[in-house]
Image: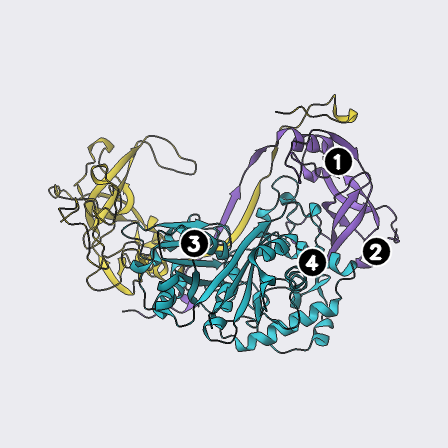
C-alpha cells in the first residue's frame, strides 16, 4: 500500500440558501482555496473526483458544468459519484494506490435550497413499495430514533445532550450554520417535530461546498509539514428496506471501522456524519469510541449539513486537526442514504 | 428465470407485471449570478458574455466559470447581435411541447466578439438553404414582450452579407466544443495547447501550432 | 469588473420535474402487487426460513434466488413508529398520523406504512394493526389506503 495523505481542505460557509450563486459559482472558492493553500494548480493534479446529486436542485447534469470550475482542459482524468464526496475521496484513494498519479482533488457540493429536501430524498427509496408513500427523510430518522428509545439504548435526554453539545461546539466553527448555546434541559421543553424527534435533533438544510486534496508519499511531505496520512479507509452498505435492518445498530459502520483499523490506537478526535442526534449515539457504539475521544468538535452535521458534502467535510475537519497538531490520530465517518444505510470510515494519523 | 411458487390465493388471478409510479418534484430555480446578469441584459436587448481576464475567452451565455482557466469570469462583455453559423441541423420531428412548424433549422451561432457559439433557431430562409458560414442577426420580439429569457430573441435570420468561409467551430483545431476529435484524434495534452501553461499542441505534436 | 449582485436581483422561477415512470415489476414484486390488488399480503421465504415482507427476489444473506411466496397477515404489530403532526401534501394521510413499521403475522421483517390514529397517545410499539384497503385497487402500494389500529383504544399488546 502507498502512503496517501490529506494535504489540503477548504469549504464554503454553510448557509440555508445561496440563491445569488449557481452551483459552479458557489463551488469555485472551495476548489481555488484548497489549491491555493498548498500552492498548487489544476495542472499539478493527477485525478479529480466529485460527489453530488442533481436531484437536489433539479438541474440535470449539473455535475458536468461544475467541472468547469476546476479548469478541465485539456481533458483531465476525472470521475463523479452520486454519493457524498467521501466516496469520491475513496475512489481517488484507490486511483492513487494504483501508483500512476501522485495527487488527487476531490470536491462535493449541494444546493438543497431550490427543492423540498426531505421529499427529494424519498427518491432514493425502493421505487415500488416505499417511494410512492413519500416517506420523508426526517420521518424515517424518527422511526430509527423510536427504535433506539424502545430498545432502552438511549433516552430523549441523551438525544438532547448531543443536540446541545453539537451546536455549542459549532460556536467555534466559522463555517457552521447552526451555532448556539442552550442547555439540553431547555431543548427537551420544545415540542416534537416528528416525534420522537425535536427540531433540535434534526440537521439544518444547507447549501455549501467543500474540497480536499490528497497526495502520495514525498509529494505530501513536500507540501505540508505534517500530512494527515490515511491509515485505513473502508465503506459498507446495508439493504434498501429498513425492515431488513436492525435500526438500533450500524453494522456497516462497525465492519468499516474494523477494516479501517479504528481500534488500532487511541482516537483523539472523531468527526461523525450523524445528521440526526440519535445517530451519533449509534455510530459511537459501532466504532467503539470512548470518553477519551473528542466527538464532532466542528459541530458535525447538526451544525451544517450540505448533502453529499458533509461526509467529505468530516474528513477535512479531522485532517485539519492533525495538521495543526491538535490531534495525532482521528476517525472520520461519512454516511449516505436513509437511517445510516451506507457508511464510510477513514482513520487519519500524523507523523511524530 | 426461476419458477415462482405462489400461495393458493394468487394462483388463478391475472398477475401484475408493471406499475405506474409517477412522481413530481417542485423547485424554485434560482439563476445565480452570471445567468441573472445575462438574462437582465436580454431585457435591455443586449447580449452579455463574461470572461475571466481581458485576454481570455468570452463565454455566451456565461455560467460564471471559464473551463479553460478554471477561474471565475467577473468581466462583463457585450457581444454583437450578428454572428456566423458554425453548425446546424434541420429538424423534421415534432417534439413534445414544441410549437415549431417542421422542418426548421436549429443552429450554433458564433456571435461577433464571443468565443462560444449559442444555439438558436434560423428562420426567414428555407431550411435547405442554411449553411455553415452564413451571417445571421438576432430578431427580437416586440419590445412589450421582452422578458428575461433567451426566447426574447425569436430567431436569427440571414443578414445578406457574404458568407464567412473561414469560420471555424470555436476551438476546432484546439479541440474545444464540437469537432474536438480533429481527424479522429482525441484531444489529449499532446495535441491540445494547455491554455493555463501554454504547453503542448504544437504542429509537430499534431496540434494547432 | 462587476460587483456581486444582491440576492434580491437574482432571477428565480418555478421548476417542476415529473418522473412519469412505468416500472416492470418482475415476478416476485409483481406477486406482491397482485396480492395487494386481491387484498392478500405475501412475503418470500428466505433460505434460513425467515419470511421477508415486502418479498425479495434474492436471499439477503446468500444472494440465491428466492422463489417461495407465502401469505402473511393481514394483521401485524408495530415494531417502531413516528408521529407526524403536520402532514405534507404528498403524505398518504391529510390528518396527523403515524409512520409505522409493521411486522405482519407470519412475517419476520416489518414493512412501512401510514397509520391513521386519533392521536400520538393511541400509538405504541407492539400495538396490533391491520390494513385498510382502497376501494379501487390496481396492484400498487397505494392499494393499502392506510393502516388502522385493531384495538381503537390502542392498548399495548
2 or 3: mark nearer the eye:
3
2 or 4: mark nearer the eye:
2
Residue beneath disc 3: A92
Position of residue C65 in the picture relative to residue B28 (left or right): right
- Rendering coords of residue C144 (x, y %): 73, 40
The mark nearer the N terminus, 2 or 4, is 4
Dots 2 and 4 on the same chain: yes
- Rendering coords of residue A318 (x, y %): 51, 68
- Label 4 Cα crowd, 10 Å radius (few <14 / some 14-19 / many 20+): few
- Which of the two residues, B169 or B147, is positioned nearer the viewer here? B169
| Chain containing mark 4 | C
The tint of chain A in the picture is cyan
Which residue is at a point 29% across and 35% down the rendered structure image?
Answer: B104
- Rendering coords of residue C40 (x, y %): 77, 33
The tint of chain C in the picture is purple
Residues at circles 4 and 1 in contact by the CB criterion of under 8 Å: no
Q: How far apart in space, not on screen, are marks 4 and 1 (Cα)?
A: 26 Å
| Chain containing mark 3 | A
Q: How far apart in space, not on screen, are marks 2 and 4 (Cα)?
A: 17 Å
- Label 1 Cα crowd, 10 Å radius (few <14 / some 14-19 / many 20+): few
2 or 1: mark nearer the eye:
2
Residues at circles 1 and 3 in contact by the CB criterion of under 8 Å: no
- Rendering coords of residue B49 (x, y %): 27, 58
Question: Which chain gets the yellow colouring?
Answer: B
Residue beneath disc 1: C135
Which residue is at a point 50% across and 50% down the rendered structure image?
Answer: A55
Mark 2 lies on a secondary structure that is: helix
Residue beneath disc 4: C86
Q: Is residue B180 visible?
A: yes
| Chain containing mark 2 | C
Residue beneath disc 2: C122
Residue A126 in which image quadrant = top right
Amino acid at each position: 500500500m502507498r502512503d496517501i495523505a490529506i494535504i489540503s481542505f477548504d469549504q464554503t460557509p454553510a448557509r440555508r440558501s445561496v440563491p445569488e450563486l449557481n452551483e459552479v459559482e458557489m463551488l469555485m472558492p472551495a476548489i481555488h482555496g484548497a489549491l491555493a493553500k498548498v500552492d498548487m494548480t489544476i495542472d499539478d493534479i493527477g485525478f479529480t473526483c466529485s460527489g453530488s446529486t442533481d436531484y437536489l436542485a433539479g438541474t440535470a447534469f449539473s455535475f458536468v458544468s461544475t467541472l468547469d470550475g476546476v479548469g478541465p482542459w485539456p481533458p483531465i482524468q476525472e470521475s463523479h459519484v452520486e454519493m457524498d464526496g467521501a466516496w469520491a475521496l475513496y475512489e481517488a484513494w484507490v486511483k492513487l494506490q494504483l501508483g500512476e498519479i501522485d495527487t488527487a482533488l476531490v470536491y462535493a457540493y449541494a444546493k438543497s435550497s431550490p427543492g423540498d429536501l426531505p421529499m427529494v430524498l424519498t427518491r432514493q427509496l425502493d421505487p415500488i413499495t416505499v417511494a410512492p408513500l413519500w416517506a420523508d427523510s426526517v420521518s424515517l430518522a424518527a422511526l430509527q430514533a423510536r427504535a433506539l428509545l424502545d430498545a432502552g439504548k438511549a433516552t430523549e435526554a441523551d438525544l438532547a445532550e448531543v443536540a446541545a453539545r453539537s451546536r455549542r461546539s459549532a460556536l467555534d466553527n466559522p463555517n457552521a450554520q447552526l451555532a448556539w448555546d442552550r442547555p439540553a434541559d431547555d431543548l427537551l421543553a420544545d415540542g416534537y417535530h416528528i416525534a420522537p424527534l425535536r427540531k433540535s435533533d434534526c440537521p439544518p438544510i444547507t447549501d455549501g461546498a467543500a474540497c480536499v486534496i490528497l497526495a502520495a508519499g514525498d509529494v505530501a511531505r513536500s507540501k505540508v509539514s505534517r500530512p494527515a496520512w490515511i491509515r485505513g479507509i473502508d465503506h459498507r452498505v446495508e439493504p434498501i428496506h429498513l425492515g431488513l435492518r436492525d435500526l438500533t445498530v450500524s453494522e456497516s459502520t462497525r465492519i468499516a471501522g474494523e477494516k479501517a483499523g479504528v481500534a488500532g490506537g487511541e482516537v483523539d478526535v472523531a468527526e461523525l456524519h450523524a445528521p440526526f442526534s440519535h445517530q451519533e449515539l449509534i455510530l459511537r457504539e459501532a466504532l467503539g469510541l470512548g470518553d477519551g475521544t473528542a466527538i464532532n468538535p466542528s459541530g458535525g452535521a447538526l451544525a451544517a449539513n450540505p448533502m453529499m458534502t458533509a461526509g467529505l467535510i468530516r474528513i477535512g475537519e479531522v485532517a485539519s486537526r492533525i495538521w495543526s497538531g491538535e490531534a495525532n490520530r482521528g476517525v472520520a465517518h461519512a454516511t449516505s442514504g436513509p437511517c445510516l444505510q451506507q457508511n464510510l470510515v477513514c482513520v487519519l494519523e500524523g507523523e511524530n | 428465470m426461476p419458477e415462482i411458487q405462489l400461495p393458493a390465493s394468487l394462483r388463478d388471478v391475472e398477475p401484475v407485471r408493471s406499475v405506474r409510479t409517477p412522481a413530481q418534484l417542485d423547485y424554485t430555480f434560482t439563476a445565480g449570478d452570471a445567468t441573472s446578469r445575462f438574462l437582465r441584459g436580454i431585457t435591455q436587448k443586449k447580449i452579455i458574455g463574461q470572461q475571466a481576464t481581458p485576454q481570455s475567452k468570452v463565454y455566451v451565455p456565461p455560467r460564471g466559470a471559464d473551463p479553460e482557466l478554471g477561474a471565475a469570469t467577473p468581466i462583463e462583455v457585450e457581444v454583437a447581435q450578428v454572428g456566423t453559423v458554425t453548425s446546424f441541423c434541420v429538424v423534421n420531428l415534432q417534439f413534445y411541447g414544441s410549437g415549431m412548424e417542421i422542418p426548421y433549422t436549429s443552429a450554433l451561432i458564433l456571435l461577433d466578439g464571443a468565443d462560444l457559439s449559442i444555439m438558436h433557431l434560423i428562420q426567414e430562409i428555407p431550411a435547405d438553404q442554411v449553411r455553415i458560414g452564413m451571417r445571421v442577426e438576432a430578431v427580437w420580439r416586440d419590445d412589450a414582450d421582452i422578458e428575461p429569457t433567451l426566447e426574447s430573441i425569436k430567431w436569427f435570420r440571414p443578414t445578406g452579407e457574404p458568407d464567412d468561409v473561414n469560420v471555424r467551430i470555436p476551438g476546432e483545431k484546439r479541440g474545444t466544443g464540437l469537432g474536438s476529435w480533429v481527424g479522429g484524434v482525441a484531444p489529449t495534452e499532446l495535441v491540445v495547447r494547455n491554455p493555463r501553461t501554454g504547453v503542448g499542441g504544437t504542429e509537430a505534436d499534431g496540434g494547432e501550432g | 469588473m462587476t460587483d456581486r449582485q444582491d440576492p434580491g436581483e437574482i432571477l428565480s422561477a418555478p421548476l417542476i420535474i415529473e418522473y412519469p415512470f412505468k416500472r416492470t415489476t418482475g415476478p416476485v414484486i409483481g406477486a406482491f402487487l397482485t396480492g395487494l390488488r386481491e387484498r392478500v399480503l405475501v412475503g418470500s421465504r428466505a433460505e434460513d426460513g425467515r419470511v421477508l415482507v415486502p418479498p425479495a427476489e434474492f436471499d439477503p444473506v446468500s444472494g440465491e434466488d428466492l422463489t417461495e411466496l407465502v401469505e402473511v397477515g393481514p394483521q401485524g404489530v408495530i415494531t417502531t413508529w413516528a408521529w407526524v403532526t403536520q402532514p405534507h401534501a404528498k403524505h398518504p394521510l391529510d390528518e396527523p398520523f403515524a409512520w409505522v413499521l409493521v411486522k405482519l403475522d407470519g412475517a419476520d421483517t416489518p414493512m412501512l406504512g401510514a397509520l391513521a390514529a386519533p392521536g400520538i397517545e393511541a400509538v405504541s410499539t407492539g400495538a396490533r394493526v391491520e390494513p385498510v384497503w382502497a376501494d379501487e385497487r390496481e396492484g400498487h402500494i397505494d392499494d393499502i389506503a392506510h393502516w388502522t389500529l385493531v384495538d381503537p383504544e390502542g392498548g399495548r399488546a
